[in-house]
Image (cartoon, helix red, strand yellow):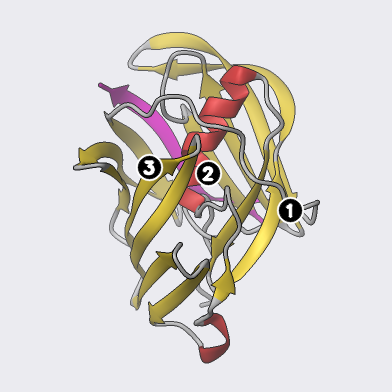
Amino acid sequence: MKTPRYALIRPLAAVALLAAASSPALAVQAFNATYQASALGMHGEGRMTLAPQGNQWQYRLTVKNQAVDMSQQTVFDEQGGHLRPLSSTDNSRFLVKKKSVNTTYDWSKAQATWSGDVKPDRAGPVKLQAGDMDALLVNLAIVRDVAAGKPLTYRMVENGRAKAMTYQVAGKEKVTVAGKTHDATKVQRTDGDKQLIVWVVSDIPVPARILQREKGSDMIDLKLTSWR
């Protein structure tokens, strides 16, 4: 069985547009969010947290059920109003297949490198540009930029490559969080037979829902149940 590729949740990587730095960020605030998770057709739980770490921040996403165990973490800081990744770890198990990847973003050399379970041609280095982010930081940027009405265009550096990406606003929908109905902005991105859809609710600092589809089937679905 072929192991599916995951996004946002890493690494559904991009629609080819002009490479563009992300818009200046609003003030970063800590949060702790829980999700109802569905992956490979099995129910489980997800958690998304953001916590200060000295002058830096630690951003973490976990998804777990009987078939999937994912743990992704990014350490970043704020420079010039941008969320700047410094390092990340990505540990995952899909059925019996395990993978562990570490990323170093060396801004003094303006390059990113990868180690762990990576192919030699994906180890880097890849040249960094101001405003570059990894997939987890795009989560924060989408919530921020939808609220500000800014273009949802980013340059993501992951998995040994840099790619430009954009999301399109697909209208408004109702979502339910902790038993309460909210108006959400639905945004989406399509790359071949893969699609990533995100629902954003005003005044909620995390995505209200993240859905990844592949070949017309739902692969990962995260629905927010609580945050603080």
Taking the spot 53% from the left edge, 44% from the top edge, the residue there is 138
| Range drawn in magenta | 214-228
Task: Tell me the kind of residue under disc 2.
Answer: Val
Verify whether residue 103 appears in magenta.
Answer: no
Report the front residue among 159 and 82: 82
Report the front residue among 119 and 157: 157
Residue highlighted by disc 3: 37
Residue highlighted by disc 1: 19
- Circle 2 — which element? helix
Q: Is residue 218 visible?
A: yes
Residue 138 marker: 2
Tell whether 151 sits left or right of 122.
Answer: right
Residue 91, by quadrant, is bottom left
Between marks 1 and 2 in the image, the one whose residue lies nearer the viewer: 1
Residue 5, by quadrant, is bottom right
Tell whether 138 sits left or right of 28.
Answer: right
Task: Tell me the kind of residue under disc 3.
Answer: Ala
- Distance from label 1 to label 2 (Cα)? 14 Å
Task: Tell me the kind of residue under disc 1.
Answer: Ala
Residue 70, by quadrant, is bottom left
